[in-house]
Amino acid sequence: MTLPESSSGNGGPVRLDGPWTHRDVAANGARFHIAEMGDGPLVLLLHGFPQFWWTWRHQLPALADAGFRAVAMDLRGVGGSDRTPRGYDPANLALDITGVIRSLGEPDAALVGHDLGGYLAWTAAVMRPKLVRRLAVSSMPHPRRWRSAMLSDFAQSRAGSHIWGFQRPWLPERRLVADDAALVGDLIHEWSGPRPADEDAVEVYRRAMLVPSTAHCSIEPYRWMVRSLARPDGIQFNRRMKRPVRVPTLHLHGSLDPVMRTRSAAGSGEYVEAPYRWRLFDGLGHFPHEEDPAAFSTELVNWLKDPEPDR
């Protein structure tokens, strides 16, 4: 199958047209692509795998209309951001995120992360708490909870089998880009709930994965997460993540998520010493912000505007 030509104007496969503005910012020794809309308190949106900033295309205008400065960034090695040879451990990726906050000239941000972006949002809130005003995480438990579930819960380990598969050299990258990145489409379909995935969106994600080096860089964070489990750097990271999150936290999850089981994500509140709200979206899978963008955006905006989020 050959993918149809992109309709993204002259921005290539990742700088897609819309009501947002594209630009690059420098942070933590690299260049990061962002798409932004609106004015007001900063809300920084962090994508997961196998996606890029465009996964937040519904939330950007919703947040801007609600009075926020909404910014979706491409993580290191993905989309329009730099593909560096190293730097894909979560501590450094979290410094990318907080560095972008500083480069945007903001004192802090509400972080909203999905999947890997959620893992990094948890990390940034622990490592640089003064720069994180609020935390919203979708489809990803706290890193210590993730580690425990992957190691001790056979059902979760099996659900996350793609992560174990990523540990092989070279083959995962080749599989991701084979047949015009057909595997990207397969994963999105398999991980979504019963609502059919947007085929046009799937094609966008496939094209983005075909940008040279993207497949390798997308996999590298997961390689670190597994290979470091018994290494000093991984043990030290796990120890650092014992520090509690001390900002209001919204935890969002699809009840039918086949990648990150509900029981694995639930319980992350034990690492939060601040108002914590758990919201389960019935009938949705791993991508609630795309499967039901209106419900997700409404929940997020209402929580961000709530002065007493512990109610």
Image: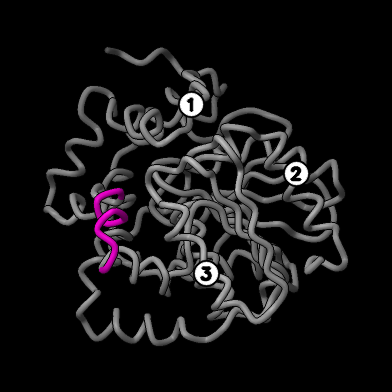
Name the main secondary structure of what is drawn in magenta: helix
Looking at the picture, does residue 91 appear above or below residue 44?
below
- Residue 271 horizontal side relative to residue 64, left or right: left
Residue pictured at 68% horizontal, 63% vertical: 277
Q: Amino acid at mark 2?
A: Met
Q: Amino acid at mark 1?
A: Pro
Looking at the picture, does residue 300 appear above or below residue 182?
below
Callout 2: 10 Å neighbours few (<14), some, many (20+)?
Answer: many
Front of the two marks 3 and 2:
3
**Residue 267 point in image, percent of width and height:** 51, 68
Indicate the quadrant where residue 177 lies: top left
Q: Amino acid at mark 3?
A: Ser
According to the picture, the residue beneath numbered tag 1 turns out to be 194
According to the picture, the residue beneath numbered tag 3 turns out to be 268
Callout 1: 10 Å neighbours few (<14), some, many (20+)?
Answer: few
Q: Secondary structure at mark 3?
A: helix
Whether 236 is among the magenta residues is no
According to the picture, the residue beneath numbered tag 2 turns out to be 37
Of 305 and 209, nearer the camera is: 305
Callout 3: 10 Å neighbours few (<14), some, many (20+)?
Answer: some
Whether 156 is among the magenta residues is yes
**Residue 229 point in image, percent of width and height:** 24, 75
In which quadrant is the N terminus drawn? top left
Residue pictured at 88% horizontal, 66% vertical: 307
Q: Secondary structure at mark 2?
A: strand
Residue pictured at 64% horizontal, 59% vertical: 278
**Residue 189 point in image, percent of width and height:** 39, 28
Q: Which residues are magenta?
A: 152-159
The CA span between labels 1 and 3 is 26 Å
